[in-house]
Image (cartoon, rainbow, N blue to C red):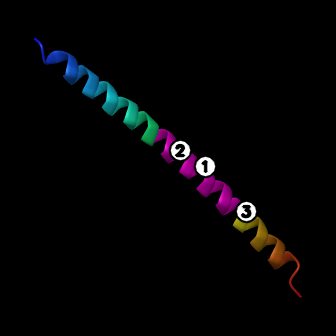
Amino acid sequence: MPDAEPVREQEQRRLDQEKKNERYVWWYLAYFLFGIHIVAFVMIYAVMHAK
């Protein structure tokens, strides 16, 4: 089968891209959750120090 190798390479490229995209999703989730906590702490600080 001469065209079996390109299919395998194409599948490997797709898996590599999928793994890269998954890594980006985890980073975006981490930054989002970190940002939410920063906002929450600022709001808590504002409420506690409001006059």
x%, y% of residue 31? 62, 53
* Residue 30 image label: 1
Which residue matches tag 3? 38
Q: Which residue is drawn at 53% across and 44% down?
A: 26
In the picture, the quarter occupied by the C terminus is: bottom right
Magenta region: which residues? 22-37
Residue type for callout 3: Ile
Depth check, front residue: 17 or 38:
17
Which residue matches tag 2? 26
Residue type for callout 2: Trp
Q: How many labels does the image show?
A: 3
Crowding at label 3, few (<14), some or many (≥20) Cα neighbours within 10 Å? few
> How far apart are the alpha carbons under marks 3 and 1?
12 Å
Residue type for callout 1: Ala
Q: Residue at x 38, y 36 (%)?
A: 17
Identify the element where label 3 is drawn: helix
Position of 3 with respect to 21 (left or right) is: left
Position of 39 with respect to 7 (left or right) is: right
